[in-house]
């Protein structure tokens, strides 16, 4: 990674700004020259003020300063998610074998995440590796989460709920993600698309409740999907309608829920790219299971 000052100079020149416009009331002209040459470092508070004057976010600056590449951990997470969503499981398994013995804590956490994805896809009970345990304990012990934790937690719900080692109620995890989610919203926008993450989290929780036959908890979850404050993009809107349709299959109008799912599948077929949600599998499993559930309810 490059020194901060020369990258700031590069951005300043790209934007056509003078040193006076960028540094006035923050640092002196002589210090600015030394800073831009890479001789001097700068306090974090002043650095953030300079970024504001440049009109650039810290994350974009980090990307530019890293030669237009994501930080290593984000690169690894992006690759893991891409391999999973495109069903390249052999390649994902090879990737895991390459990194799972790393002594770097962030890489161990990403490796644990990859192990969980592979295990979740194969639907079998599996022992908790040290990387998976590290990932889960990290999430459970930290009350304040970054975007990385918010994005990871949904895939861990079946493990946290299913392994005796982790005596934590799903409601506790839900309260924590909801509290941390609020930190990333502004009054008028969702700049980090955490609303989509929250909707998908609720979807995973709904599926877990249905799989474990905790139907009352699943029934009570409906209002979570109808929260008005969510700033959803079109992926989030599709996810929201998908999970509300699944809810209808079990607890509302079965035919209406099924019809909505068919519309979503038809809409998905218009696009060559794969969706992160395996909608076809969800449709097949939930239509059959909800029909059995409603039959049992009627014949009590």
Image (cartoon, rainbow, N blue to C red):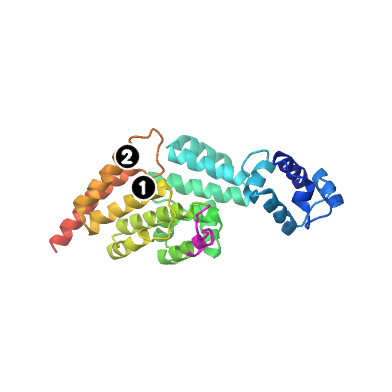
Q: Give the vertical position of 104 relative to 172 (above or below).
A: above
Q: Where is residue 171 in the image (x, y as percent from the top left)?
A: 41, 66
Q: Give the vertical position of 83 relative to 187 (above or below).
A: above
Q: Residue 238: which numbered mark, if any?
A: 1
Considering the whole magenta stretch, tell me its main secondary structure. Answer: loop
Q: Position of residue 80 (x, y in %)?
A: 51, 42
> Going by the image, does 150 lie left or right of 207?
right
Disc 2 packing (10 Å; few <14; some 14–19; many ≥20):
few
Q: What stretch is highlighted in magenta?
A: 179-191
Query: Which residue has dot 2 on it?
Result: 267
Q: Is residue 187 magenta?
A: yes
Q: How far apart are marks 2 and 1 (CA)?
A: 10 Å
Residue at the location (70% across, 51% down)? 53
Q: Quadrant of the C terminus?
A: bottom left
Residue 166 seen in the figure: no
Which of the pair 148/101 is nearer the observer? 148
Nearer-N-terminus badge (2/1): 1
Q: What element carries label 2?
A: helix
Disc 1 packing (10 Å; few <14; some 14–19; many ≥20):
some
Q: Give the vertical position of 199 relative to 262 (above or below).
A: below
Q: Where is residue 69 in the image (x, y as percent from the top left)?
A: 63, 39
> Going by the image, does 291 lie left or right of 104?
left
Which of the pair 292/12 is nearer the observer? 12
Q: Residue furthest top?
A: 272
Q: In which quarter of the image is the N terminus?
A: top right
The reply to whether callout 2 and callout 1 are in contact (CB within 8 Å) is: yes
Q: What element carries label 1?
A: helix
Residue 272 seen in the figure: yes
> Going by the image, does 113 lie left or right of 226?
right
């Amino acid at each position: 990674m490059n020194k901060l000052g020369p990258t700031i100079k590069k951005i300043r020149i790209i934007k056509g700004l003078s040193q006076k416009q960028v540094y006035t009331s923050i640092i002196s002209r002589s210090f600015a020259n030394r800073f831009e040459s890479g001789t001097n470092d700068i306090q974090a508070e002043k650095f953030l003020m300079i970024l504001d004057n440049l009109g650039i976010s810290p994350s974009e600056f980090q990307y530019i300063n890293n030669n237009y590449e994501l930080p290593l951990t984000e690169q690894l997470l992006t690759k893991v998610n891409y391999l999973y969503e495109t069903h390249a499981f052999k390649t994902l398994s090879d990737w895991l074998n390459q990194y799972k013995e790393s002594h770097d804590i962030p890489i161990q956490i990403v490796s644990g995440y990859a192990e969980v994805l592979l295990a979740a896809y194969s639907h079998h009970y599996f022992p908790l590796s040290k990387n998976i345990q590290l990932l889960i304990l990290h999430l459970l012990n930290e009350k304040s989460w970054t975007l990385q934790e918010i994005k990871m937690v949904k895939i861990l719900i079946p493990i946290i709920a299913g392994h005796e080692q982790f005596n934590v109620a799903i409601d506790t995890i839900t309260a924590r993600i909801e509290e941390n989610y609020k930190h990333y919203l502004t009054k008028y926008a969702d700049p980090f698309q955490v609303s989509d993450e929250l909707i998908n989290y609720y979807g995973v929780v709904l599926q877990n409740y249905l799989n474990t036959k905790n139907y009352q908890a699943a029934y009570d979850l409906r209002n979570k999907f109808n929260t008005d404050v969510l700033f959803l993009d079109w992926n989030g809107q599709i996810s929201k309608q998908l999970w509300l349709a699944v809810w209808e299959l079990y607890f509302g109008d079965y035919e209406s829920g099924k019809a909505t799912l068919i519309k979503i599948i038809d809409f998905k077929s218009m696009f060559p790219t794969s969706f992160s949600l395996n909608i076809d599998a969800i449709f097949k499993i939930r239509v059959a299971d909800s029909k059995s559930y409603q039959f049992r309810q009627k014949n009590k």
